Image (cartoon, rainbow, N blue to C red):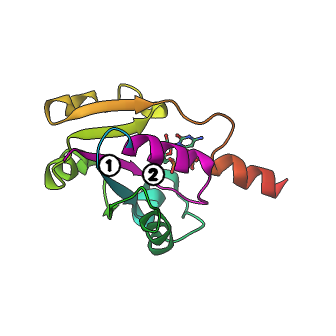
């Protein structure tokens, strides 16, 4: 059985999120998703996600393509998570292209094209206007 791992905030769940999770699943049989904690988001962007980590995690966990969810507490722990969850493949959106090549010694690393014209940031901007 091939295990795939991916990471993200997945706030204001949108079609780009669903697309990447469905495509990630196609690289294996079992999809594990690290959902970044509120604290991690705050430390990187100085703001909290709209939906709490509990809410974001429940939404991701309810998806048919997702088999397991955990909290990503720190960006520096990616290698540890890959080992802990025995991942064979790491899938990331190509906004992270080349950034995770160091993990090629642990597993296969695949960058997928982002879905054009949608992001959580953009949804927030559109609603504000
Ligand atoms: N993603 C994607 N296509 C999009 C938006 C996101 O493939 N249009 C992917 C990202 O590459 C990442 C995952 O979805 O692998 C989670 O991304 P996240 O950062 O949570 O979503 P964004 O919409 O990019 O959020 P933000 O605008 O806050 O950066």
3 magenta-colored: yes
Q: Quadrant of residue 70?
A: bottom left
x and y, in percent, of residue 79 in the image? 19, 44
For label 2, the residue is 44
- The answer to whether residue 115 is above or below residue 15 is above
Q: Residue at x 54, y 49 (%)?
A: 17
Residue 59 position within the rendered picture, expressed as x and y whole percent measured from the top left: 50, 68
Residue at the image point whose x is 34% and y is 31% from the top? 110
The residue tagged with tag 2: helix, strand or loop?
Answer: helix
Q: Secondary structure at mark 1?
A: helix
Q: Which residue is mark 1?
A: 75
The structure residue drawn at horizontal position 47% and vertical position 55%, both measured from the top left corner, is: 9
- Vertical order, 51 against 26 (above or below): below
Alpha carbon of mark 2 to alpha carbon of mark 1: how far? 10 Å
Q: Is residue 67 left or right of residue 88?
A: right
Foreground mark, 2 or 1, reads: 1
| 10 Å crowding of disc 1: few (<14), some (14-19), many (20+) | few
Place of residue 15 in the rendered image (x, y in percent of width and height, measured from the top left): 62, 49
Stretch in magenta: 1-25
């Amino acid at each position: 059985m091939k295990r795939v791992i991916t990471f993200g905030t997945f706030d204001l769940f949108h079609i780009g999120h669903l697309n990447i999770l469905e495509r990630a699943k196609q690289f294996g049989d079992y999809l594990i998703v690290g959902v970044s904690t509120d604290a991690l988001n705050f430390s990187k962007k100085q703001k909290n996600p709209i939906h709490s980590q509990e809410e974001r995690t429940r939404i991701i966990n309810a998806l048919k393509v997702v088999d397991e969810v955990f909290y990503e507490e720190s960006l520096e722990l990616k290698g540890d998570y890959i080992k802990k969850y025995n991942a064979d493949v790491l899938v990331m959106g190509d906004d992270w292209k080349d950034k995770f090549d160091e993990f090629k010694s642990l597993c296969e690393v695949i960058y997928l094209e982002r879905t054009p014209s949608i992001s959580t940031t953009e949804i927030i901007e559109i609603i504000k206007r």
